[in-house]
Image: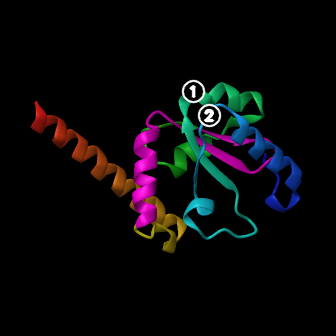
Amino acid sequence: MIEPISKIPQNETQRILDLLEQSEFTFHKTGSRFFGGVDTNSDWDFFVDDSATNFLRRIGFVNDRESLMFSYSDCDIVRVLVHKVAHIHVQVSRNIDKRRRIRNVLYRHSLKRFDKETRKRIWAIAQTIWDDAKSVRIRQCE
């Protein structure tokens, strides 16, 4: 069980954030701390390549099956990990470039002005458009 954010020592959260930053992996910020809307209950959300999984487990991250099953319609997400103490979620993805590009396009087009549920729906639509466009380009080039 994860402690409520108000009970998590800030120095522990900062310690884990520092470990992520100092690691060999690139952690891409997402969620409210990227798109906007941060409040006192905001956690930290990142996505990273699947190769970072063992590192994350070594520093205290565990599977968050509930988030994976009920919060993400993205087939590129292999797993969602959450830190046992700090309120940090990491989406482990097999296609970082796609996620980063979609995130950046949505940011440029003011996704931050929408609430979290609407952002999820828009994200899902953007992924579908991306995947459909990729398959059309592949067929056209063959």
Rendered image: mark on residue 120: none
- Residue 128, given in percent of the width and then of the height, sits at 31, 50
- Residue 11, given in percent of the width and then of the height, sits at 88, 51
Q: Which residue is mark 1?
A: 51
- Residue 58, given in percent of the width and then of the height, sits at 75, 27
Residue at 61% in and 70% down: 37
Q: Quadrant of residue 35?
A: bottom right
* Residue 86 among magenta residues: yes
The amino acid sitting under disc 2 is: Phe
Q: Tell me the magenta residue range.
A: 80-108
Left or right relative to 103: residue 56 = right
Check whether the beta carbons of the residues at disc 2 and disc 1 lie within 8 A of each other. yes
Residue at 24% in and 42% down: 134
Left or right relative to 128: residue 79 = right
Depth check, mark 2 against mark 1: the one in front is 2
**Which label's residue is closer to the chain start, 2 or 1?**
2
* Residue 36 versus residue 127 in the image, above or below: below
* Badge 2 element: loop
* Badge 1 element: helix
Q: Which residue is mark 2?
A: 25
The amino acid sitting under disc 1 is: Ser
Left or right relative to 32: residue 59 = right
**Mark 2–mark 1 distance (CA, rounded to whole Å):** 8 Å
- Residue 41, given in percent of the width and then of the height, sits at 74, 65
